[in-house]
Image (cartoon, rainbow, N blue to C red):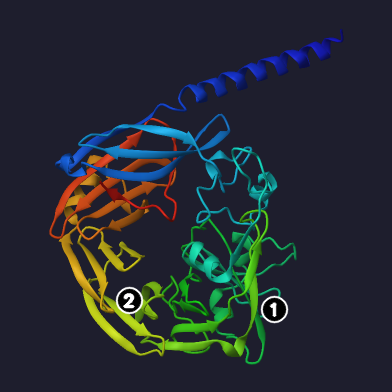
Amino acid sequence: MNKALLVLLSVLLISSFGTYKALSEISSHRNDVEFSQRNIYGDSSVLNGLELHFDILGYHKNIVWENDIRFTQNGFVSKSEVQPANKTEHRHYKDKIDKVTLNLMDNISPDDAELASVMEEITHDSVNGQEYEKTIYIKDYYEYYPLWCFFSVNDEELIRKYGQSVFYDKNDNNTGLYSIESYNSRKLTEFLKIGIPENETISIEVINHGISFGNSIGYHVETMSTCSDNMIYFYVNNRCTDGSTVEFGRGYGIFRIPYGNVEQNNYKGVYKYSGIDIDADNIDLFYSMDENEMVKALSYDEAGRKLVLVTEKEDETWLKVISDEGDLLQQLSVGEAGDKTDICMQDDYLVINEKGSYLKLYQLCNGNYELKINTDSTVMDNACDESHNNFDLSIMRSKYYYDGKYLTVVKTHNYRSFILLGVYDNEKLLYAGWHDCNLRGRINWPDDTRINWK
């Protein structure tokens, strides 16, 4: 037999054995996932009956799987039961395990050529291996994804959104791929001063991104948006990181665009984006604001037909409720503004957590927000920082759940399989602790996750 062929067969055999060994190692731990507990404040007995529902996306040797884990505590952390998910909408990558997306709210940029080249082109059923397509409505699209849009004056001048920032892109080589180099070609301020021409049709696109480019240069502004059943509301901060200001062309404040309930097809999972064309002269300055006031959070209350804003002005944070007609219905001073403000709007409650200062929870009651919890957050923040080698909690994802009795705070890190759990009643912090998983991976909290107290 040819010597080269023998060498090739030997390499393949060794490789196959290595793969088998890796798979065996994974299988042996598939149903043996448990959490360790580290109490850093309070009595863990307050967790008696608490259930947390989430997934762990474990990985090893380029093998990825999704687990549905139920974590029940009765004064201690119980062993978790791990079952394969019936269906996954996660992307699987061949050599980019650290880039695996957790869910539809954390997607790799479709403009990243390298990632696109290794991405499997379909979203599939993880058990049966079946392909499927998902059809959604534009309103659901806007509510489900970390959305924004870009305004296209022509094919070469775009504003693109990454995370919570808007960048100016200029496609010099007409490849359709945008990079950090391309948006450096011109300043965002140059584009914003152009404004949107009257009587011109522009393209409003929904883009799904999970990558944020680091940026310390001057042409970087913040933006955010929300929507009702027929309107898109959006805000563009007019201050750049270099301290200069920009002009949007139609004033400053909350803008509104009608769009109608247009059905969109989302083929091959979330890789492709959807969009609708809207006449530029339909863009309306819905709520005018002082240019010294910045919007920190924006949400639409569907039931009450109201727009809810959290703003910052003169080092103070404000809560505002705006009617569909643009009238200010309610305005409350929340407290001193800071650099690390975490805001959560969910269902009928709003949480504002200023790291190292205060945590407040407001709940909608008879159309107005009422303060339900007002407590000092420094105990949890400081204790957690000190207990984890001053780990920066601000880079962790936060979720807040309120059942009328307890406010449960859960923080996770994108690439680590631990959670930080805190429980407040209406007056104070009752418990804080780290909970670490023996399976290395990433924790995924689905949008419909709820915390139940039994």
Q: Whole-Å distance between the Cαs marked 2 and 1?
A: 33 Å
Please name the residue shown 53% across and 48% down the image.
101
Q: Position of residue 54 (x, y in %)?
A: 40, 45
Residue 54 located left or right of residue 11: left
* x then y, percent, for residue 396: 36, 51
Residue at image mark 1: 154
Of residues 383 and 44, which is closer to you in this image? 44
Disc 2 marks a residue whose amino acid type is Thr
**Mark before the other along the chain sequence, 2 or 1:** 1
Mark 1 and mark 2 in contact (Cβ < 8 Å)? no
| Residue 217 visible, this angle | yes
Percent coordinates x, y for residue 334 in the rendering: 22, 73
Amino acid tagged 1? Asn
Which of discs 2 and 1 lies nearer the camera? The answer is 2
Disc 2 marks which residue? 311
Q: Is residue 173 above or below residue 378?
A: below
Q: In the picture, which quadrant includes the N terminus?
A: top right
